Image: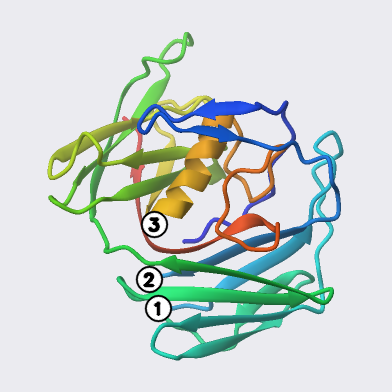
């Protein structure tokens, strides 16, 4: 299941971010320029219509409404020479005309032509890592009585760099926190990670769904930057510009990733 929920609400920008895992300082530029193209593009391993959304950014102090961009020419290609032409349905939403499933190890390229400008990006789909199970326990991060926290369990493949993004839903509502992990300290190990969410209180009896995405390094950097900013995971726009794999200064991302999900009732 792809994440196509509402775009990011505005927050105060952080100028310098430090990744603990690589000690790399990233300089984030404030979105002072408006009307920039925002791209949310995904290719997944699920056999379905693949979707690319186009919009324009607005000042982060404004209401969270992003004008759709219509009339663009949007194509997706793979390294084998296959081409998918996308057609516009709802304004700003472009879908392939036929269903297809992305393949691990294959690089997919996106081309968007709009306003006499061409924007491109590429992303290589990682291999699927199986989400084994979910569990719940007493929350360590909330001072509210009887709240629960959710953990994910999976086996990281040995000898291969892996990056993960998780998306959580509580009673059908997406948690806005961003969840990313890599295997820098867990290569080849059985992983048990807590999804430390601060958005929705979870209690026994709640229905929780977790989507697990295996993403490439560029997309991991994008989402992890947003996480370190404290920005929610609802879309492609933030008050600062995280590193993107898109050219010509477009905001957002193009991601070829695997996806799977599990649902359970919190105990």
SS category of the residue bearing label 1: loop
Q: Which mark is residue 45?
A: 2
Q: Is residue 21 above or below residue 55?
A: above
Q: Which mark is residue 216?
A: 3
Q: Is residue 103 left or right of residue 94?
A: left
Q: Say which label, 1 or 3, has the lower sequence index.
A: 1
Residue occupying image coordinates x 63% and y 54%: 252
Instruction: Sort mark 3 into few (<14), some (14-19) or many (20+) by Cα contacts within 10 Å.
Output: many
Q: Let me know if residue 171 appears in the view.
A: no
Q: Is residue 177 above or below residue 218?
A: above
Q: CA distance from mark 2 to mark 3?
A: 14 Å
SS category of the residue bearing label 3: loop
Q: Say which label, 2 or 1, has the lower sequence index.
A: 2
CB atoms of marks 2 and 1 within 8 Å: yes
**Front-most of residues 55 and 152:** 55
Q: Which mark is residue 101?
A: 1
């Amino acid at each position: 299941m792809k994440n196509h929920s509402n775009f990011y609400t505005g927050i105060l920008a952080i100028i310098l971010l430090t990744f603990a895992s690589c000690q790399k300082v990233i300089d984030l530029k404030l979105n002072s320029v408006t009307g920039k193209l925002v791209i949310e593009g995904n290719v997944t391993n699920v056999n379905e219509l693949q979707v690319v959304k186009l919009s324009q950014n607005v000042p982060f102090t404004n209401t969270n409404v992003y004008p759709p961009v219509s009339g663009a020419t949007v194509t997706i290609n793979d390294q084998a020479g296959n081409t998918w032409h996308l057609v516009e349905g709802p304004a700003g939403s472009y879908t392939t005309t036929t269903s297809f499933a992305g393949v691990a190890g294959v690089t997919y390229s996106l081309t968007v032509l709009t306003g006499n400008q061409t924007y491109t990006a590429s992303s290589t789909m990682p291999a699927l890592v199986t989400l084994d199970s979910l569990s719940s326990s007493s929350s360590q991060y909330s001072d509210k009585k009887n709240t629960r926290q959710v953990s994910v369990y999976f086996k990281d493949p040995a000898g291969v760099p892996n990056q993960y993004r998780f998306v959580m839903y509580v009673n059908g509502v997406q948690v806005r926190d961003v969840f990313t992990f890599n295997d820098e300290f867990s290569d080849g190990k059985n992983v048990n990670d807590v999804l430390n969410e601060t958005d929705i209180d979870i209690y026994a009896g709640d229905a929780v769904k977790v989507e697990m995405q295996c993403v490439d390094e560029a997309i991991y950097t994008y989402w992890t930057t947003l996480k370190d900013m404290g920005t929610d995971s609802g879309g492609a726009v933030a008050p600062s510009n995280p590193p993107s794999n898109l050219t010509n200064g477009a905001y957002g991302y193009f991601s070829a990733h695997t996806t799977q999900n599990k649902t359970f009732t919190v105990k």
